Amino acid sequence: MTSKILLYYKFQPIADPDAVRLWQRDLCEGLGLTGRIIVSKDGINGTVGGDIRACKTYAKKTREYFKGIEFKWSDGGAEDFPKLSVKARKEIVSFGAPGELEVDENGVVGGGVHLSPEQVNQLVADNPDAVFFDGRNAREAEIGRFKDAVVPDVETTHDFIKELDSGKYDWMKDKPVISYCTGGIRCEVLSSLMINRGFKEVYQIDGGIVRYGEKFGNSGLWEGSLYVFDDRMHTEFGAPGDPDYVQLGHCVHCGEATNQFYNCANEPECRRQYLSCEDCREENPYCAECTQRATASPASPA
Ligand SMILES: [Zn+2]
Ligand SMILES: [Zn+2]
C-alpha cells in the first residue's frame, strides 16, 4: 500500500463553514485519512495523509466544491498524523484580522500580484530596489531567506499587523515588495494587509518558497534551508558539498554554523526551538535561556 500526503488551500466564500467541516470530517473518516483541516468563512486549509487511492478520491470529491483547488502531493502518509482534526475557525491562517480579509470566487480580493519563480527573478533583475519581505516567523528566517530579505520581528502571524502599523517598513511603501512564505498561503493574507496599509506594489510567489526552490534549488535568489513544520524541522534544496549550499544559522551555544533546530529539553516549561550544532546538543539539550538560568541557580532546569 502506497501512502501520500496532500497539502492544499483555497480561498473562497463559504456560507456555512460548519456544514463544510462536517462534510470534510465524514469524507476523511470514510476514507481513513488523518491530518489537520481548518475551514472558515473564507476557505479551507489542510494537510491530510493516507492510502494513495483514498487521497485521490478525497481530492476529487473536495474539488467538486472547491473548484480549481490545487493539491500538492508529497511522500508520507497517515502515520505522519496521529489523528484527524477538522475545525471551523474565524480564519484559515490566523493573522487576527478576520474582518479585514475580503474573499470572492476568485480568491483573496486586493491581494498581491502572483509571480512564478521565473517572474520573481525577472522582477529583481529589472528593479534593483525591489525588496523581499519575509512573511514567516522570524525564527524560520534564521536558517534560510531570500537574498537581502527584510525579516519582520514576529513570533507568530498574529504579530504582523502591529509590526506593519509600527511605521518600521514605511520606507518600502513605494518600492516593489515581494512577500514570500513556505507554500504561499500566508502571503495571500499578508499581501492584502500590506496593500490595505498603503504598500503600493506588492507581489507574492505562487507556491511560495517550496515552488521557487523546486525550480531553482540553491542557484537562484534563495539562500539556506527551508524551515518545515514537522519532525525534520528543515529541508534543503541542495546537498552539503554543493557549492551554493549555505548554512545561515548559528549554534546558540558555540556559534558554529548549523541549520538544525531542536526543541528545548526543558519541556513543558520551555517551548523554545533553538539552533544547535550536534556536539553542543549532545552535551546540553537546553536552549540558551534555560542554560543560563541553570548556571545562575544550582537547580537543574528540568
Ligand atoms: Zn555548538
Ligand atoms: Zn529552554
Image (cartoon, rainbow, N blue to C red):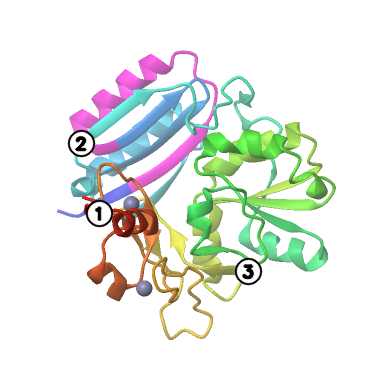
Residue 97: % across, % down = 58, 25
Residue occupying image coordinates x 20% and y 36%:
83
Task: Give the number of the mark in front: 3 or 1.
Answer: 1
Mark 2 and mark 1 residues within 8 Å of each other at the beta carbon:
no
Residue 91: in magenta span: no
Which of disc 1 and disc 3 is earlier in sequence? 3
Within the displayed image, which quadrant is ligand 1 positioned in? bottom left
In the displayed structure, would residue 43 be above or below residue 287?
above
Residue underneath mark 1: 265
Residue 129 seen:
yes
Residue underneath mark 2: 83
Q: Is mark 1 within 8 Å of ligand 2?
A: yes
Residue occupying image coordinates x 25% and y 52%:
301
Which of disc 1 and disc 2 is earlier in sequence? 2
- Report the disc number at residue 221: 3
Label 2 amino acid? Answer: Lys
Q: Residue furthest right?
A: 174
Label 3 amino acid? Answer: Leu
Rate crowding at label 3 as few (under 14), some (14 to 19) or many (20 or more) other CA atoms within 10 Å. some
The residue tagged with tag 3: helix, strand or loop? loop
Q: Which residues are magenta?
A: 6-35
In the displayed structure, would residue 37 be above or below residue 124?
above
Rate crowding at label 1 as few (under 14), some (14 to 19) or many (20 or more) other CA atoms within 10 Å. some
